[in-house]
Amino acid sequence: MKTEESQSFRLLAVHAHPDDESSKGAATLAHYAAAGVRVLVVTCTGGERGDVINPKMKDLDGITERIHQIRSDEMSRAVEILGIEHRWLGFIDSGFPQIDEATGIVPSVPGGSFAATPIEISGSALVEIVRNFRPHVMTTYDELGGYPHPDHIRAHQVALHAYEVAGDPTFYQDMGEPWQPLKLYYNQQFPLERMIALDAAMRERGLTSPYGERIAKYEQSRPTRITTHVRCAEFFDQREQALRAHATQVDFDGPWFACPIEIQQSVWPTEEYELARSKVGSVDVVESDLFADLQLDLPAL
């Protein structure tokens, strides 16, 4: 991958909430930004209904009332740490519905929230960004959302919709000149193989591993399809600092930070993706670069 001052590749990452960009592919974003790629994160919601995860912040005065502004401020710090650009898509967090254990019923998402918004509305908003930013590559979650939060699933649907129609002049004719992204990837940042490798490395060093329960859970789930391994170990520290910037959303003494960066860099120096759609060839590939097989500023297809 080569970039020039006058023109560069452009990467658009679509995420559901502030903090998702720092827990899923953050080192990749920092890696490409440092290489001269224009990197834009679109956050679909403000995270208004997210819980305060950090136990040291749960009881701060007025934190619930101020959570929207706090999460916006956290996002700004993470963006600065990663050296990337950012846009809000402008929708309201849907919250994570709690299943009624007695009945098994899953409550519906709140009216007016992102997951309840028709795809034609949220999709048109993202298409406008795609046509203005003109990315060569997009990333988002797979059809399960990475995990089944309604906003993650909707982010997948909206990103896929935008990828498919942004280049079609018959869609959203008042949202800018058509632009066709050339590749769409799904984040696959927690493959079973990665957790097994890190778990073994920590145990070998006499450290307490946080991965045992997750490994057992993942072994019962569907296999992860991975096509692309991006080497970005030198940006793992930025990844961690960006996640720490979302202080309401992570326990600094919890499992996210249990594995030392040095172990991660030596044992698993990559972040993983699934090539889901491509306009420049087959999706059945093995790659080390999201921009593999692309040329700068190829015309829209």
Image: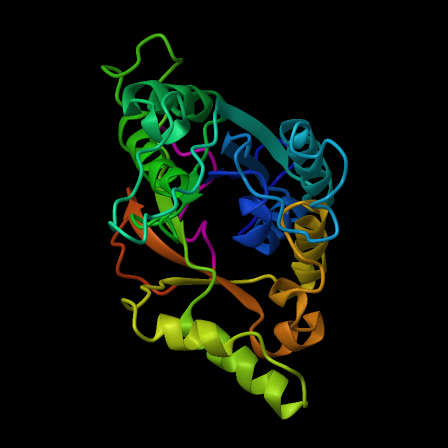
Looking at the picture, tell me which residue is in the foreground, 299 or 120: 120
Rendered image coloring scheme: rainbow
Toward the viewer: 224 or 139?
A: 224
Q: Quadrant of residue 239?
A: bottom right
Q: Residue at x 36, y 57 (%)?
A: 274
Q: Residue at x 66, y 27 (%)?
A: 65
**Could you tell me residue 291's position as x and y percent?**
45, 49
- Residue 149 is one of the magenta-drawn residues: no
> In the image, 117: left or right of 23?
left
Does 87 appear above or below 83?
A: above
- Measuring 27% from the left and 50% from the top, which residue is drawn there? 281
Tell me which secondary structure the magenta stretch mostly adopts: loop
Q: Which residues are magenta?
A: 289-301
Q: Quarter-wise, where is residue 180 in the image?
A: top left
Residue 167 seen in the current view: no
Task: Say which quadrant the C terminus sits in.
Answer: top left
Residue farthest front in this picture: 102
Up/down of 253 relative to 163, above or below: below
- Residue 50 percent location from the top left of the image: 54, 40
Relative to 95, does residue 113 appear above or below in the rendering?
above
Instruction: Tell me: 117 left or right of 8.
Output: left
User: Which x, y percent locates residue 119?
Assistant: 29, 25
